[in-house]
Amino acid sequence: MALFEDECTKPKVDSLAEQKAHYQKWERANRLGILVMKKSISSSLNVSVPNETNAKKFLDAIGQWFQESEKAETGQLMQKLCNMQYDGGVLD
């Protein structure tokens, strides 16, 4: 629910019970979503993950972080490939 819907506005005191219930469901889904995502990330990577309070933004931040990481890894592999020298062997 929290990943599919934008953040709800916090209901006022005089809001309808239906609006309050919807917000409570969204807030619970948001907290659980963040908790599940944080627990499924390795503890070594957990330090570099931003501290977001919105599950949708948290997922976007993780996606952006991994995209940047993938670009760095691609650069390292390309550099290694370009610096390789032929040693005359067919198989290692």
Image (cartoon, helix red, strand yellow):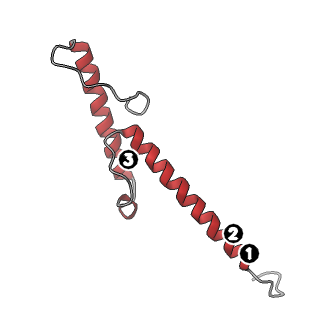
Hey, what amino acid is under mark 1? Cys
Dot 1 or dot 3: first in sequence order is: 3
Q: Which residue lies furthest to the left in this view?
A: 13
Give how far apart the Cα atoms at labels 1 and 2 are.
6 Å
Residue 7 position, x and y percent, is: 35, 29
Say what amino acid the circle numbered 2 marks. Answer: Met
Residue 84's place in the image compared with 63, above or below, is below
Q: Viewed as shown, does residue 91 lie left or right of 31?
A: right
Looking at the image, residue 9 lies above or below residue 44: above
In the image, is 89 to the left or to the right of 34? right
Mark 2: give few (<14), some (14-19) or many (20+) Cα within 10 Å: few
Provide residue 65's location: percent of width, then percent of height.
Answer: 48, 54
Instruction: Name the residue that disc number 1 marks.
Output: 82
Residue position marked by numbered label 3 in the rendering: 37
Q: Where is residue 53 in the image (x, y as percent from the top left)?
A: 31, 42
Local SS, label 3 = helix
Task: Name the residue beneath numbered marker 2.
Answer: 78
**What separation in Å lies between label 3 and label 2 (alpha carbons)?**
32 Å
Tags 1 and 3 touching, CB below 8 Å: no
Q: Is disc 2 placed on a helix, strand or loop?
A: helix
Vertical placement of residue 57 versus 77, above or below = above
Q: In this view, does 78 lie to the left or right of 16?
A: right
Q: Which is more foreground, mark 1 or mark 3?
A: 1
